[in-house]
Amino acid sequence: MRIIETEQAARRLARAIASDLSLYNEEKILEGLQADNLYDALSDEIEEGRELFNTRVIPELQGNNFYDRAIIDLLIKSKGHIKCKLW
């Protein structure tokens, strides 16, 4: 596996990992949003994804919050139609 050294590739990886989380954990995401405990409900999965991201990306890019932004975009914002306390 090659190490990612560009911001564009790091963003793509972060979004791919978040997309997989969304795809394979749809029920947990919906329950977590409705119960207002999404991060608790998916803490293991989110941290596993973060570890994968950090092992594939150079340290200089890890602090740019690409992974956290992808989690927000794909696990939270994309579920704006779900009734929850966030909105």
Image: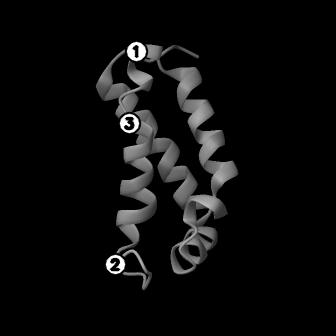
Image quadrant of residue 51? top right
Residue beneath the point at 59% across and 22% down: 55
Instruction: From the image, tell me which residue sits under label 1.
Output: 60
Whichever of labels 2 and 3 marks the residue nearer the N terminus, that label is 3
Mark 2 Cα shell of 10 Å, populated few (<14), some (14-19), many (≥20): few
What separation in Å lies between label 1 and label 3 (alpha carbons)?
A: 12 Å
Provide residue 11's location: percent of width, then percent of height. Answer: 36, 34
Tell me which amino acid carries mark 2. Answer: Trp
State the separation of the CA atoms marked 2 and 1. Answer: 34 Å
Q: Looking at the image, which residue is at 36% across and 26% down?
A: 9
Crowding at mark 3 (Cα within 10 Å: few <14, some 14-19, many 20+): some
Identify residue for label 2. Answer: 87
Q: Is residue 84 above or below residue 50?
A: below
Crowdedness near tag 1: few (<14), some (14–19) or many (≥20) residues, C-alpha within 10 Å: few
Q: Are marks 1 and 3 in contact (CB under 8 Å)?
A: no
The residue that label 3 is drawn on is 66
Q: Amino acid at mark 3?
A: Phe
Q: Secondary structure at mark 3?
A: helix
The answer to whether the residue labelled 2 contacts the one labelled 3, judged by CB atoms less than 8 Å apart, is no
Q: Secondary structure at mark 2?
A: loop
Q: Quadrant of residue 86?
A: bottom left
